[in-house]
Amino acid sequence: MSREVLQKELRLPVSVEKAYAWHERLGALDRLLPPWEAIEVTERGDGVQNGSRVVLTHRWGPLRFRWVAEHCDCERGHRFRDVQRSGPFRHWDHTHCFEPDGEGSVLRDAVEYEVPGGSLGALLGGRYVRRKLDCMFAHRHRTLAEDLRLHEQYADAPGIRVLVSGSRGLIGKALVPLLTTGGHDVVRLVRGGAGAGDAGWSPERGELDQQALAGLDAVVHLAGENIAAARWTTSFKQKVRTSRVRATRLLCESLARQVRPPRVLVSASAVGFYGDRGDTVLDEESGGGTGFLADVAREWEAATRPAEEAGVRVVHLRFGMVLSPLGGALRRLLPIFKFALGGPVGTGRQYWSWIGIDDAAGAIYHALMTESLAGPVNAVAPAAVTNRDFCRVLARVLRRPAWLPLPAAVARLALGEMANELLLASTRVAPRRLLQSGYRFRDDDLEDALRHMLGRVA
């Protein structure tokens, strides 16, 4: 047999009991999956207990692989094992061992694995698999440590019941497991038929399940049409506006009618509020700009007024470009740069304000828990970068050249008005209120952020 053993160690800022409890909660596996791999949890089992099975689906191009793992040898607060019952490896046995370490704890991962194909498979693919596993564990350990640090910051606060709209979107998919692993109860606000524990609504028809809003402590509103989903025709722009303004007003009017409204509403907005402002550094005191996105953002934020008047603390998180290989701008850019076809857009001097996906979810968590925050809050990394620098960094991380610029005229021809506001506009935004309120960014350097989320260890 050609079995290999991978051993990794991680010091954690919490006790053994808290570290183990995190792994038991719904959403733990979602938080640990490498985002650069197309892996989905299709069956979750019954948590970390003997005999419970988890099923993963891994897409690799047109191919799909099913991976079934079973928990065994579970000793609560000390260890558990994940053993492959069927999947891509010939053998896989992963032991998680938790030990006290002063005021914190140590997690020791030991994986005994065997690639398919015996000795020949090990010769041809052994090094590749080992590199992939090293990257995967580097990502999961950093994510675990940072998540536990965030949860520990608010350890004295009681668990809350949170309604989340847009839970199936890019930010929502990161936020929900971050909340549930923190011990909070999440209710998803979904369109169409609501499943068990979900709440249903139809903004187009002005319908929302009023009973589902009872007993909420907080609401996170992320729903809205993807602004880059289609060319900005008159009808599509109206769809974007309606999906944000009408839906937000419906939700906030419904919350205001509750006998006991939730304490806080965190409602998404965007740095498009500021418009095209060149090199000017913009914070929450800066006035709004002009253009379609600026107009939509103003109306979007104003639509929360019924909740504010009902005494709800409302936070408008103005998101910059949210970076994740699972969606958004980065997902669209990756194939272009991987094929060495990337380069700056227009002059490349326009500023792009960005935020990593984990910080996007972390900023929401922080806003929910921080009573001093209300009104507009910029959700961007501390250092905006020019488009030219963004392209250089992405190309360096991918080990590709960034030699093919996209002239502004060509961008406008291809995308119309969207090119002016999404690609060519310069919006240099600072997260002043987030920093002043004590939020600590996981990713304040673009290259570090991209390497973490793309599994490209330097």
Image (cartoon, helix red, strand yellow):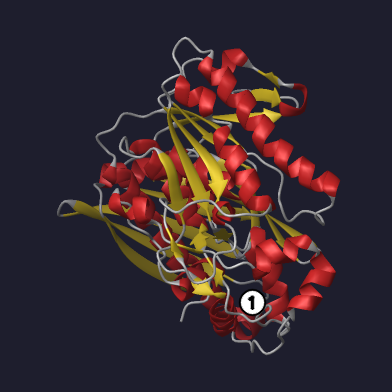
Left or right: where 388 falls relative to 184 = right
x and y, in percent, of residue 440 in the image: 32, 56
For residue 123, which quarter of the picture? bottom right
Label 1 belongs to which residue? 118
Looking at the image, which is closer to me, 370 or 427?
427
Question: In the rendered image, which quarter is residue 217 located in?
Answer: top left
- Give the percent coordinates (x, y) of residue 134: 47, 73
SS of the residue under disc 1: helix
In percent of the image, x 57 and y 64: which residue is there? 91
Amino acid on which disc 1 is placed: Gly
| Position of 285 relative to 258 (above/below) | below
Q: Quadrant of the N terminus?
A: bottom right
Q: Residue at x 42, y 51 (%)?
A: 284
Q: How far from the left and from the top, in percent, is residue 120? A: 66, 83
Quick one: 235 or 91, which is closer to the camera? Answer: 235
**Up-down: is 273 above or below 189?**
below
Number of marks in the image? 1
- Position in image of residue 251 (x %, y %): 60, 25
User: What residue occupies the far top of the structure in this picture?
Assistant: 259
Q: Quadrant of residue 347?
A: bottom right
- Badge 1 crowding class, 10 Å Cα cut-off, few under 14, some 14 to 19, many 20 or more, is few
Q: Nearer the viewer, residue 204 or 35?
A: 204
Any part of residue 155 in sight: yes
* Residue at (58, 61) in percent of width and height: 324
